[in-house]
Amino acid sequence: MDHPTSRSAPQLSVVIPVFNEAATIEDLVAKVRQVEVDMELVLVDDCSQDGSREKLEALAERYDNVRAFYHEVNQGKGAALRTGFAQATGDLVIVQDADLEYDPAEFPKLIQPILGDEADVVFGSRFSGGERRRVLYFWHSLGNTVLTLLSNMFTDLNLTDMETCYKVFKREVIQAVRIEENRFGFEPEVTAKIARMRLNGERLRIYEIGISYSGRTYDEGKKIGWKDGVRAIWCILKYNLRTHRGSDA
């Protein structure tokens, strides 16, 4: 379901990759739509098998600012984001997971540095002064720290949470990035590419803002695992060494 052609571009495009999230997607969309920001929701179902697709179809039919797209073969989060970014029409684009780990009520503070012409990209950090954070897996947290440190060593950024879901971009920035990774390698890939990217001849201004986090356990549906961590290391090396050699985004 597309927006009417007469509708002006929204301020914010919320790109939501969906894979087997029938239990949470309706609650998540309700929370996003409560945020007082002019927005569109771009939902991308990555060939779910639990009824998520039917829920997306109903949501797109019910709300004018919800559009849904569908993959006929499961490809991964990065592939779903690639589809969503291409369809985004807002001035800004934010990534929102379909579970309830991240709180959409924090959209206004995340987009403010870009609206105030201070930033081109904003990362929401789970480890930089958020209001609350669910206490879960030590090794998972350590893995995030190691991956962020390794990424920082190559990008020369001082991020505290490279693997965060909440990343906000000017639309012209993210639509200029060629996303190659189909799974969770999206995070180190896009970080490497924006670290080297230029807008109007200048390097991108990247900000980080502390966010709250209510992580899921694996029993509750968390999908990322140790193999994705190994892939992330490969992606850090691959995309940073490539950009150092001068390849484009």
Image (cartoon, rainbow, N blue to C red):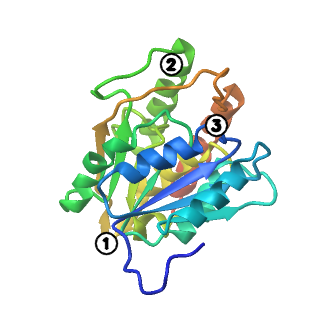
Please say if the residues under marks 2 and 1 sit with CB atoms less than 8 Å apart. Answer: no
Type of the residue with mark 2: Leu
Marks 3 and 1, how far apart at CA:
45 Å
Counting from the top left corner in percent of width and height, residue 194 is at 43, 56
Q: Can residue 247 be seen at all in this image of the molecule?
A: no
Where's the N terminus, which quadrant?
bottom right
Residue 249 shown left or right of residue 120 in the figure? right
Type of the residue with mark 1: Gly
Marks 3 and 2, how far apart at CA:
29 Å
Residue at x 42% of width, y 49% of height: 32
Of marks 3 and 2, which one's residue comes earlier in the chain? 3
Of marks 3 and 1, which one's residue comes earlier in the chain? 3
Marks 2 and 1, how far apart at CA:
37 Å
Counting from the top left corner in percent of width and height, residue 19 is at 69, 45
From the viewer's side, name the closer residue of 167 and 8: 8
Residue identified by numbered label 3: 23
Q: Quadrant of residue 56?
A: bottom right
Above or below, 8 relative to 71: below
Q: Which mark is residue 29?
A: none
Q: Which mark is residue 142?
A: 2
Per the image, label 1 sits on a secondary structure element best described as loop
Residue at x 66% of width, y 61% of height: 57
Residue identified by numbered label 1: 201
Of marks 2 and 1, which one's residue comes earlier in the chain? 2
Residue at x 61% of width, y 61% of height: 82
